[in-house]
Amino acid sequence: MSSKILVTGGLGYIGSHTSVELIQQGFEIIIVDDLSNSNTDVLEGINKITGITPKFVNLDLRNKSDVNRLFENHQDLNGIIHFAASKAVGESVERPLDYYENNLSCLIYLLQAIENKGQEFSFIFSSSCTVYGQADELPITEQEPIKKAQSPYGNTKQIGEEILFDNTRSNELLKVISLRYFNPIGGHPSIKIGELPKGKPQNLVPFITQTAAGLHEIINVFGDDYPTRDGTCVRDYIHVVDLAKAHVVGLKRMMADEQIENFEVFNLGTGKGNTVLEVIKAFEKVSGVSLNYKIVDRRVGDIVAAFADTTKANKTLGWEAKSDLEEALKTAWEWEKKIRNIKPNISL
Ligand code: UD1
C-alpha cells in the first residue's frame, strides 16, 4: 500500500529533520506549516539533502474548513505526524488561551477530518517528557505517573494525549503513537537544516551556540544548588536526527499493524543525563571556544533531573539513540556557524 503522510509543522525544527528521514525512507509527504516559527528556506534545505522538494501547503490548522479542504484535496492520506504546536513554556503562562486554542483545536480538527474519512489512519503525536513533571523515579519509564502540569504548554501535551486516547476508543480505525521527547538538540550532519529559534532562545543549547557565535555576552546557569553531582540540573539531551528516525519507525509499526494497543506511548531520549555544566564543558571541548557563564538564581518551574528509561522504545520499536552529547553538540555548532557566516574551524 502506498503511503502519503501529512507532516504538520514540517518546516519546524523537529518536523524538518523528520521530513528528511521520511523522504529518505520512501514516504511521500505533504508539509503543512503556518510559518509562525519557520520559513520556506527549509524546503530548500530538505531538497539539498534528499533531492526532493516536498509538497508544501501554507495553512493555519486553527481554520477548520481549511483542514477539511486539505483532506478533500488529498484523499489518499493515510498518516499524520503532528508537530504543529506552540512550545514556549513561559509564553504559555502569559497567554494560556492562545496555547489551548492552538495546540488543542488543531488536534481536534485533524482528528475529526480523519474520523470523517472512515479509513485506517496512523497518527504520531509530538509529546514531551514535561508530562512527567519531577518524576519520583529516575530514569523515567512510561509507567511513571503523569503529574499535574506545570504550565499551560505542558497541560496541552497531557490533554492532547488524553484526546487521542479517547479517540482511539471511539474510532477503531485510528492508530496512535505518542512520542515523549526529552531534550532535542543539534542539527542535520549535512548542515543543510537545523534549529532556528525565534528571538532570544530559552533553551540551553541554542543559547550556548549563539553565545559562542558572539550574539550574547554570557550564559546564565540557572542554579547550582540542586541535589545533583555538580549542583546544576540534569537533562537527557538527544540528537534531533535520532529523534526524527524514531518517528519513521513508529509510523511503520502502525502501518504494519504491529501495535499491541491502538494508543501507545514511548519515551525518546538517550537514557543518559547530563548537567548544565557538563553540557557547557562538552561544547567547549568540541568547539574549541571557551564560554562565558555565570551562576544565577534557579529558573522558576525547572525540575531537578529528568532522563529517560528507553527500554520500551529500544525493545518494542527496535530504535535507539546513536549519537552522544558531543556529536550532537558538534552539529549544533556547525549549524550556528553556518547561519552566522563564521568560518569553519580547522580542528573540527
Ligand atoms: C524546556 C521546557 C519543556 C519543553 C522543552 C522543549 C521548561 C521548564 N521546560 O525543557 O517543557 O518541553 O524545553 O525543548 O521551560 N538552562 C540554563 N541557562 C539557560 C537555559 C537553560 O541554565 O540559558 C538550564 C535549565 O535550567 C535546564 C537546562 O538548562 O536545567 C535545560 O533547559 P532547557 O533547554 O530550557 O530545557 P528544559 O527546561 O528541560
Image: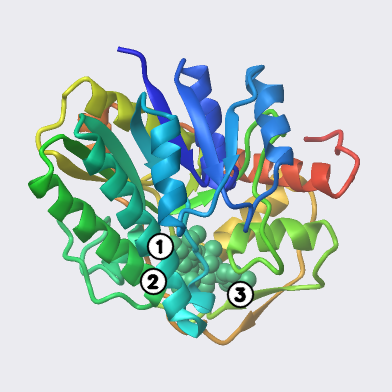
Residue visible at 52% across and 68% down in the picture: 88
Q: Is residue 309 visible?
A: no
Q: Can residue 202 be seen by looking at this rendering?
A: yes
Separation of marks 3 and 2 at Cα, in angstroms: 30 Å
Q: In the rendered image of this protein, does residue 328 appear above or below residue 28?
A: below
Looking at this view, is 93 or 308 the one in front?
Answer: 93
Location of residue 244 in the rendering, given as x and y in whole percent from the top left corner: 46, 36
Which residue is label 3 attached to?
Answer: 221
Nearer to me, 225 or 14? 14
3 or 2: tag closer to the N-terminus: 2
Label 1 element class: helix
Residue at point 24%, 76% (across, down): 148
Q: Which residue is mark 1?
A: 103
Judge whether 305 appears above or below 182 on screen. below
Note whether 264 is above or below 206 in the view shown. Answer: above
Q: Position of residue 226 (x, y in %)?
A: 43, 78
Q: Amino acid at mark 2?
A: Tyr
Tag 1: Cα neighbours inside 10 Å, few (<14), some, or many (≥20)? many
The circle drawn on residue 100 is 2
Discs 1, 2 touching: Cβ within 8 Å: yes
Name the element at disc 3.
Answer: strand
Please provide percent x and percent y for residue 341. Answer: 89, 45
Describe the element under mark 2 as helix, strand or loop: helix
Mark 3 to mark 1 CA distance (whole Å):
30 Å
Residue 191 in the image: above or below residue 236: above
Q: Judge the density around disc 3: few (<14), some (14-19), many (≥20) Cα neighbours within 10 Å.
A: some
Please state, as top left, top right, bottom left or bottom right, where the C terminus lies in the image: top right
First in sequence: mark 3 vs mark 1: 1
The residue under the point 37% across, 37% down is 80
Query: In the rendering, at what x and y percent does residue 144 appear?
Result: 18, 60
Q: CA distance from mark 1 to mark 2?
A: 5 Å
